[in-house]
Image (cartoon, rainbow, N blue to C red):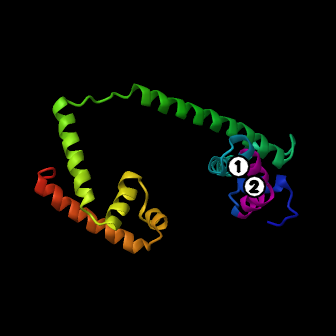
Amino acid sequence: MTTNTSDAALAVAIGRYDRDALAEAYNRHGSAVFALARRIVRSRELAEEVTQEIFLRLWHKPQRFDPERGKLRSFLLSDTHGRSIDMIRAEGARRAREEKDAVLAPRTQESVEGSVWQNVASAEIRQALMELTEDERAAIELAYFDGLTYREVATKLGQPEGTVKSRIRTGMKRLKTQLTALGVMP
């Protein structure tokens, strides 16, 4: 396919499963499709998904485009607008479902015994943590209590990632030994 090929000829070639024709259609109109989708859905990831779907639709059903009714770009942008609106509605419905499920999710009630045991275990865990070296404790607290990755912990502490991994591993072994001795862990 050349850049001189008309959009109508591209659509015919795409109907014959000519990948070069689809690539040329994407080269010509992909950025416009993506820009419109991005403006409507306000998310790069969702806009990329919409763009992919639009060109997949063109690949699977090129006969939907009628050159007598308008230009390929107009057809693709119209399709993009509709799909983007559908995407927004689907995302809104998904969010509403998740929020509803979160509200309706059953809350587990702990027994008094379970609560007491958890408090005792928490106190013993805190004490065991205090017996670690400062470097081990800092790395473990950032990784397990703040939910940071090894790389994030290393960056925050200004230390090599391998050193952080080693300190966490060593500290966790020491914690396990201490908590097992206290009967907190089996």
Residue drawn at (86%, 47%) of the image: 71
Q: Which of 46 and 57 is in front in this view?
A: 46
| Residue 26 part of the magenta-drawn span | yes
Residue 19 at x, y percent in the picture: 69, 62
Please name whichever residue, 2 or 115, is drawn nearer the observer in this view of the structure: 115
Q: Are marks 1 and 2 in contact (CB under 8 Å)?
A: no
Vertical placement of residue 180 versus 170, above or below: above
Asked whether 30 falls inside the magenta stretch, the response is: yes
Which residue: 70% across, 56% down? 16
Residue with the mark numbered 1: 58
Residue 150: give x, y in percent of width and height.
Answer: 41, 64
Q: What residue type is labelled 2?
A: Gly
Residue at image mark 2: 30
Q: Which of 10 and 174 is in front in this view?
A: 174
Q: Is residue 64 above or below residue 173?
A: above
Left or right: residue 158 versus residue 50 is left
